[in-house]
Amino acid sequence: MRPSREARAGRREPPFGLLLLGLAMAAVLAGTLGLVSERISATAVEGFLSLLDSDPETAWAILTRVRLPRVMLGAMVGASLGLSGAALQGWLRNPLAEPGLIGASGAAALGAVLAFYFGLADWVQFALPVGGVLGALAGLGLLLAMVGRDPSVLTVILAGVAVSAFSGALTQLAINLAPSPYSTLEVITWLMGSLANRSFDHVLLALPLTLVGWGLLAGTGRALDALTVGEDAARSMGVSLTLLRWRIVLGVGLSVGSAVSVTGVVGFVGLVIPHLLRPLVGYVPSRLLPVSALGGAAIVLLADVAVRYLSPGQELKLGVVTALVGAPFFLLLLMDVRRKTQ
Amino acid sequence: MNEAPSIPLLADAVHVDRGTRRVLSGVSVSAGRGEVLGLIGPNGAGKTTLLRALLGLQPLAAGRIAIAERALEHWPRAALGRQIAYLPQAGGEAWPVRVERFVTLGRLPHLEPWRGPSRRDREIVAEAMAATDVARFAHRPVTALSGGERTRVHLARTLAVGAPILLVDEPVTGLDPYHQLQVMEMLRDQARERDRTVVVVLHDLTLAHRFCDRLALLAHGRIAAHGPPGAVLRPDIIGDVYHVSLFQGADGAVTLPWTRITDDTRGETAA
């Protein structure tokens, strides 16, 4: 036995409460940064000062109508992605499962694009998140049908590739057939994933479905822990895998679907965050759920502040940045998994 | 509390199909309190399927299973999880959690919602780890252990459930001789001293002979023989089912598979 990284990681485990507190503080700090940051100025301090310079009424309006919804959405989306990633990984016992990689995000985007495309979203605003949720659920349903009773690393990733490719093709078809270049541009920009120019309407649109999704996922901790000992052993201890499957699929579908429908696709958060935090909770799936939710919120808020400063001219899209950082991380993780299974 | 029922485990004419293939046909077994029942039989005879059927994890095509004299389908899943503990064959540990935490997962059927393990739970876990000799690597990740060590950790998790019925599938596979004996002694103690019911799948006929009170020999999904070890581990029966000859000591106490019976050796294998 080589002295594994895991053995050392076990000793580095901080107290659980402290970890939760630290991540919550990181999220609050990142949110505060997001509130005071302004894109054009060089630093957050300058942004804050320039806010003080303007008249109080304008400053208040900027804070509450522009930046607060942006920060709230960032926290919501980040928490949804982190929580969903942790839940999916625990359920499939697969460190590579992620809402984006298994096609749930892509399918959600397709659902939202269709709601948008057929004018349903103009007709009833609520059609947008509902479209996203239905898309995500359809994508997850397709994935499950392909994976069957063998959720091995390889089959899940391959099925995810298929679902992503299929929903991506249909999304492109919708864009291709779009009535005007303007709406094409609108959809493409939105697909890149961003928190910019969002209002409280968007928050209110996504919040109810997101909360239901969080609630469903929050209750899966004990069953996920039980799965650590294997499927049959977990079932022998009274865990219903059918119930667990429904909770996870509905929970991920609701939270990721509604998040994607208002912010576009923000990839890899659900992969990277649970992976980085897992050793810190001693690999216990139930503890990883709240920790990943807080970590996801913190990282999306931080990334959103970063995109405002990294690109003084054209604002970088959040989804582009998370993909740029996340994709190489995924590659490294894949090589690690391959090395371990060989 | 009621008086404990006299037949903790009963399978009556159980049939199980997998696809179009019948994997168990008309299997009837029972196990009493304080008894170690050994399930033996060649690979693919249906031993694991029978254990899974007893747990309600395997749908029956026909027949009846009763746990503590109550039909299996009338047991709520959670209550059944406290009544029967199961050690599946190959361990499927998903994450490198520490051994102590892994064993503590055995207490899950007893935990209140949103509450952690109590002091009593921790005592039971410590006891289970001591009984399986895994306490000395309590803080190591379970995935860093050797195959035999992992098997014992899984067994500790199974013991930690504290259930009156233990179904263990090949608990000594991959273990060194010392730990094979230790695990079998521990299972026998669970039956004798704790008055528990132990059903154990074994391939080692010597251990089966030595530690089981009764044996059920499965072949092609049917019970080929059952009864006390001496009545089942007979050269003629074992020769028919396993195609090996038996070496038995003068008093019948040692039972060793000796040579393979092939077409060439048939007729010259009187033990």
Image (cartoon, coloured by chain):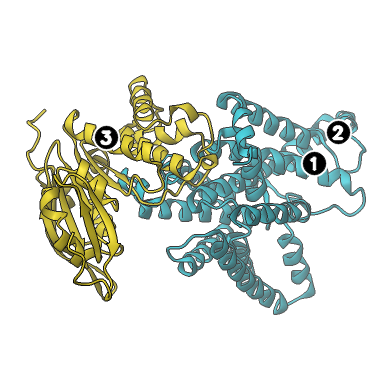
Q: What residue type is labelled 3?
A: Glu
Apparent colour of chain A:
cyan
Q: Give the left or right position of residue A64, taking residue A237 as reference.
A: right
Query: Could you tell me which secondary element the residue under label 3 belongs to?
Result: helix
Amino acid marked by disc 1: Val
Q: Residues within 10 Å of mark 1 (few under 14, many from 20)?
A: many
Q: Please tell me in which quadrant of the rendered image residue B270 appears.
A: bottom left
Could you say where residue B105 lies in the image, as x and y percent from the top left? 40, 36
Pick the quarter of the image with the C terminus of chain B. Answer: bottom left
Kindly identify which residue carries mark 1.
A305
Q: Which chain carries label 2?
A: A
Q: The disc labelled 2 sits on which kind of residue? A: Ala
Residue B26 placement, left or right of A216: left
Q: Which of B261 and A30 is in front in this view?
A: B261
- Say which chain tag 3 marks: B
Mark 3 in CB contact with mark 1 (< 8 angstroms): no
Please give the label number shown on residue B155.
Answer: none
Q: Are marks 2 and 1 in contact (CB under 8 Å)?
A: yes
